[in-house]
């Protein structure tokens, strides 16, 4: 990787925000929700309740939990097929999300979308996009829709997406039009089975944004408070009319790319080193209040178990009743 | 010839053509070191090395463009687009460069490129990992589309595609990768349909996984005294109208059975050709395809959305009724 510094502390990220204990606890709550949700989904997938494929977010929670903590109602987020985390961080209902993955009528999209294509406009989720790079365009467009107001849009995407035409066209487009869009690259070092260095010339993703004159920070994506600080600073600049911003968050997926991948192409030492930097463990350490952390974990776990049970009890859509129309009326 | 699987037959075709002609290249996302996300191409990288077989960035437009440019200057590139749904990102180069070059250059050079992609629904992969790109490609003169239903045809058609001097899209139905059958030997000609079951009462025309549904329906119907002839198109462009017309001249009834949307698909187009050129032979003709909607995720919705062997048999039974036996 290039000479660009990676910010690993809140102080290293421009801006004057320092999280309070309550804010740290809120961040932990969100991250635990994301983690426990994905663990439930993994179990349901292995039980054959979730169909097709599923891309889990475990290990990367600090990124969307951190970024979305800097957003307000009315802001927009676009994410990827690995998007359950972003959806939940935006406040999407876990029961409906679980029901969607289970293909139930009560799902976020009535069972039509499935894991890779969730849309939840009520919670500011423009969509999760199954095409690598698609989220970048959707958020750029949402930002165009926000121009002139004080709302902003965020695109989450992976390192692999920075090799798509979508990435280069949209960054340029957003800068030329000075759109209020925050591009958040979740650099987990792999696109499917291929390491970043083998697919991404220069291996400097933040540098790619700087070429377009877009302010870009590279941050430790496994530290919630660092991501949150960087996002707050970027969002403030966007609301002040300073145009697109970029965050490269270094992180790691703990599991394989999708359900069928055991992740054998990753050196075990590398996996271990990243597991030791678990974003949830790190935030718990920062919060330094085990009693409170345990209570949050237990509460989140209880809520999720109940939500998943309700989702499982919900009916499947009935094609004879749940008629779809090709066109909007 | 011993039995093999559909995916192994594809790998064998690639291996044989890479061996046979050093101008052949093979590349795509995670096709080399990892052997493909559908485990279709293991071992090729190890055997032929990074100069011939390589992984690429996630850049479908660059893949198609690189295939086009290298084909024009003398290579015979084969590239994989992981899911047919992603072909749309490669379409400009494929449609506006590769498909037109031979004609508009006044035949200065051919464009011998092949693109393979996994297609088809039924796997609960949702709207963006289940499509079959045929309707997008059918209206593009200069492109060939092959669509095998058996391991032997998968192998033989891919070999023909690689040897063909035109851009050829090879559609590989995901739900066929694991089927077994004879491996077959040599090439299978592009543009020739195959009568896979003979019958006198109705002609069922299908491709890819649809052929298996058609054969299953034909078996059911045989129990009711209806003999269906089943045609496996194998190539969707250029389409083998003659084999279909010959069959319809015999059976006088035809149903086109396709997994894709009815509008813009091969089924309506072929029905039009039959009406135009074989009208006097037709007592009945129709299309069974999917509705005009994106492909749903939920099992109940997807099952209802897709045509099935049962629906095919039911509709034929209802429309053919008791055939008069000679
Ligand atoms: C256009 C397109 N090409 C290929 C794929 C298949 N695919 C899904 S995820 C993925 C890897 C993406 O890597 P990255 O952008 O780093 O995101 P990550 O999965 O690591 O979060 C690929 C190749 C796709 N969904 N869309
Ligand atoms: Mg990645």
Image: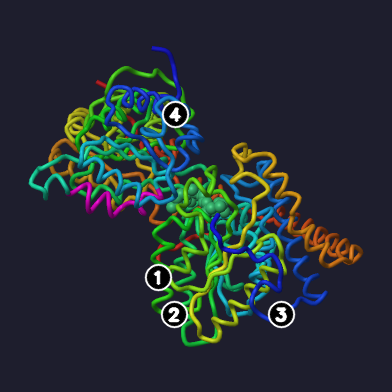
Dominant SS in magenta = helix
In the rendered image, residue B141, in percent from the top left (x then y), is placed at 18, 47
Q: Is residue B89 magenta?
A: yes
In terms of secondary structure, where does tag 4 sit? Answer: helix
**Does the CB distance between marks 1 and 2 fall below 8 Å?**
no
The residues colored magenta run B85-100
The mark that comes first in sequence, 3 or 1, is 3
Disc 3 from disc 4: Cα separation: 55 Å
In the displayed structure, A215 sits above or below A223; it is below
Tell me the residue that label 3 is attached to. A17
Q: Which image quarter: residue B246? A: top left
Left or right: residue A20 compared with residue B130: right
In the displayed structure, A132 sits above or below A148; it is above
Tell me the residue that label 1 is attached to. A172
In terms of secondary structure, where does tag 3 sit? Answer: loop
Which of the image's four quarters has the N terminus of chain B?
A: top left
Which of the image's four quarters has the C terminus of chain B?
A: top left
Left or right: residue B236 compared with residue A288: left
Q: Residues within 10 Å of mark 3 (few under 14, many from 20)?
A: some
Residue closest to the far right = A291
Tell me the residue that label 2 is attached to. A178
């Amino acid at each position: 990787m290039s000479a660009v510094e990676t910010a690993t502390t809140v102080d290293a990220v421009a801006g004057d925000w320092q999280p309070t204990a309550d804010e740290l606890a809120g961040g932990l709550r969100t991250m635990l929700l994301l983690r426990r949700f994905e663990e439930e989904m993994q179990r349901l997938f292995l039980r054959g309740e979730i169909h097709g494929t599923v891309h889990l977010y475990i290990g990367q929670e600090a990124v969307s939990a951190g970024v979305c903590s800097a957003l307000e109602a009315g802001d927009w987020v676009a994410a990827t097929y690995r998007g359950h985390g972003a959806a939940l961080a935006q406040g999407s209902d876990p029961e409906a999300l679980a029901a969607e993955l289970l293909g139930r009528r009560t799902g976020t999209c009535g069972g039509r979308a499935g894991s890779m294509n969730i849309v939840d406009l009520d919670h500011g989720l423009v969509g999760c996009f199954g095409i690598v790079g698609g989220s970048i365009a959707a958020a750029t467009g949402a930002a165009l829709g926000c121009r002139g107001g004080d709302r902003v849009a965020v695109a989450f995407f992976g390192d692999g997406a920075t090799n798509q035409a979508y990435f280069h066209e949209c960054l340029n487009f957003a800068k030329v039009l000075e759109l209020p869009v925050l591009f958040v690259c979740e650099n987990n070092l792999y696109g499917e089975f291929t390491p970043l260095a083998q697919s991404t010339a220069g291996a400097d993703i933040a540098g790619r944004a700087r070429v377009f004159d877009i302010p870009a920070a590279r941050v430790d994506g496994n530290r919630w408070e660092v991501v949150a600080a960087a996002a707050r600073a970027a969002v403030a600049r966007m609301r002040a009319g300073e145009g697109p911003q970029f965050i490269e968050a270094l992180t790691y997926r703990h599991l394989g790319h999708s359900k069928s991948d055991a992740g054998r192409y990753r050196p075990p030492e590398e996996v271990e080193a990243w597991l030791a930097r678990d974003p949830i463990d790190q935030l718990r350490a920062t919060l330094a209040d085990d009693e409170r952390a345990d209570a949050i974990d237990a509460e989140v776990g209880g809520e999720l178990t109940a939500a998943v049970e309700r989702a499982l009890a919900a009916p499947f859509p009935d094609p004879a009743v749940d008629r779809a129309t090709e066109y909007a009326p | 010839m011993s039995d093999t699987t559909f995916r192994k037959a594809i790998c064998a075709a690639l291996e044989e053509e890479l061996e046979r002609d050093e101008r052949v290249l093979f590349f795509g996302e995670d096709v080399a070191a990892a052997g493909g996300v559908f485990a279709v191409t293991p071992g090729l990288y190890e055997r032929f090395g990074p100069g011939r077989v390589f992984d690429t960035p996630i850049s479908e437009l660059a893949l198609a463009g690189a295939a086009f440019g290298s084909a024009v200057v003398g290579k015979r590139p084969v590239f994989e687009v992981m899911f047919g749904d992603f072909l749309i990102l490669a379409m400009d180069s494929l449609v506006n460069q590769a498909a037109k070059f031979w004609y508009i250059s006044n035949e200065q050079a051919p464009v011998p490129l092949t693109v393979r992609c996994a297609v088809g629904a039924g796997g609960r992969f949702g709207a963006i990992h289940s499509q079959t790109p045929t309707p997008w490609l059918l209206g593009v003169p200069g492109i060939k589309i092959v669509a095998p239903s058996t391991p032997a045809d998968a192998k033989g058609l891919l070999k023909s595609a690689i040897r063909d001097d035109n851009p050829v899209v090879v559609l590989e139905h995901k739900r066929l990768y694991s089927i077994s059958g004879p491996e077959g030997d040599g090439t299978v000609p592009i543009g020739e349909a195959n009568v896979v079951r003979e019958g006198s009462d109705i002609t069922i025309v299908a491709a890819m996984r649809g052929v298996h549904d058609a054969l299953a329906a034909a078996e059911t119907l045989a129990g009711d005294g209806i003999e269906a002839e089943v045609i496996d198109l194998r190539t969707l462009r250029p389409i083998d109208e003659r084999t279909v017309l010959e069959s319809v001249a015999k059976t006088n009834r035809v149903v086109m059975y396709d997994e894709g949307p009815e509008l813009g698909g091969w089924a309506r187009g072929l029905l039009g050709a039959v009406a135009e050129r074989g009208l006097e032979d037709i007592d009945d003709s129709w299309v069974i395809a999917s509705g005009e909607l994106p492909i749903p995720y939920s099992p109940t919705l997807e099952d209802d959305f897709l045509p099935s062997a049962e629906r095919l048999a039911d509709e034929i039974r209802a429309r053919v009724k008791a055939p008069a036996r000679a």
